[in-house]
Amino acid sequence: MAKMTAKGLEKLMRENEPKRTALGDKLYLSITKGGSASFGFRYAVGKSSRLMGLGAFCPVNNTLAMARAKALNIQAMLKQGADPLEQIKQNQKQAKANLIAQEGLEAMEQATFSALAVEYIAIKSPEWKNAKHKQQWLNTLTTYAFPVIGNMPASKIETKHILKVLTPIWTTKTETATRVRTRMELILDYAEVHKWRAGSNPARWRGHLQTSLPSPAKMKKVKHHPALPYAELPQFMAQLATMDGIGARALEMCILHANRTQEILKAKWDEFDEDNQVWTIPEENMKKDIEHRIPLTDQAMKMLALLRKHRLGDYVFPNQSNGKHLSQAGMSSVLRRMGRTDITVHGFRSTFRDYVAEKTNTPQRTAEAALAHQLKDKAEAAYQRGDLIEKRKMLMQTWANYCYPSKRKVLQMPTAKTIS
């Protein structure tokens, strides 16, 4: 069959009759009822015949010559054993995959460490106990990590960048540095889960950074809260009793029951069962999120009776200017007024523990229960589910009597038999 020429194609187009016409070299022109014309190429794969579209006829962008060139390319593919239609599908599939990959790379480029850190903090902060913890996360990362890796895509962060963050503070601010490292590791784990980075975490410690940085446990010096020696406590309590203000009374109550600061500051009247002389601190005010009962001493009951006469609201130790609870500085400011900048409020827990260990035969688990400490032995803790409050009543009263010595002792010094 003779090949259709360009002039012959023009004549065919003027006829404008719906039909399919062979143009030679297996090339066809199809004209529809609406008058549109398009090229096609017919070929066989096995026993199947296929017609492959080559685009609409256009005297500028898709001429007969162009269609023939496409047909030659198809014939070359057939000679190589390829199915042109399947090849096109594969090419389109690959192009789509490439586009998705490119979009993924662009997304990874936009997923900077600081942006992911803000996301992670927003997601995890509801499980944190207080807003202060959230602020600490943001403050440490803003101060130490963001200046180095904040604007970097998480996918580009390497071990050298992590070391650049940590090395300047690792030996001088060890505790802060270890927290920064842990927080960077968690954020980069978050990035990996969401496909914003791949590969091992450059901030992990075990088997990685531990080979490049000294162990915090071995170089860290334990810094204890400065504590008052228990031998000086009776004189201190006598001086404290002369101090005016709600902060002084809060400090007295704190010392009498070896409390943590937050337990005192957030104490509310409905926590106190004065009939049974028991103070039940709710779990949200406890460090370990476990409710804690404290036996109230005779001295504490007298103090509560006095405070109740001047009650201003729900809090036992209120901030008299705004009705909220006493601030963090409420008790420490009393120490400053007393000229005792050498000790801390938290240190009185150590004073209590030293007294119990050196002046009584109290079993360790009873003393630890008084401080709301959990047993380190997990097996023992699993079976010791009680809070030993009956045994702690005598211990705390003996401690209170020591704090406020008088000629008449309410109870004798406890022995192994009486409070074991």
Image: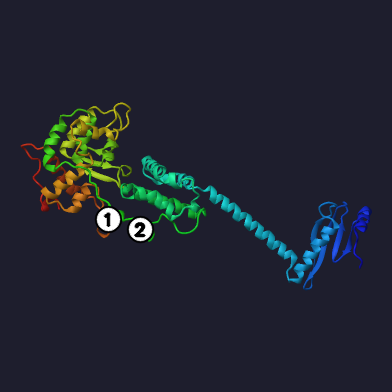
Q: Secondary structure at mark 1?
A: helix
Task: Please tell me which residue lies in front, 131 or 303.
Answer: 131
Q: Which residue is mark 1?
A: 218
C-beta proximity under 8 Å, tags 2 and 1: no
Tell me which amino acid carries mark 1.
Answer: Lys
Q: Which residue is mark 2?
A: 210
What scheme was used to colour the molecule? rainbow
Q: CA distance from mark 2 to mark 1?
A: 12 Å
In this rendering, the answer to whether 351 lies above or below 312 is below
Label whose residue precedes the other's in the sequence (2 or 1): 2
- Extreme residue in the bottom direction: 46
Tag 1: Cα neighbours inside 10 Å, few (<14), some, or many (≥20)? few
Tell me which amino acid carries mark 2.
Answer: Gln
What residue appears at the point 10 percent right and 43 percent down from the top-left corner? Answer: 411
From the top left corner, tell me how far across and down residue 340 is, in percent.
18, 35
Task: Please tell me which residue lies in front, 187 or 25.
Answer: 25
Task: Please tell me which residue lies in front, 368 or 275.
Answer: 368
What residue appears at the point 88 percent right and 63 percent down from the top-left corner? Answer: 23
Q: Left of 118 or right of it: where is 262? A: left
Where the N terminus falls, by quadrant?
Answer: bottom right
Decide if residue 296 is in sight here: no
From the top left corner, tell me how far across and down residue 265 is, in percent.
28, 36
Quarter of the image holding residue 91? bottom right
Decide if residue 283 is in sight here: yes
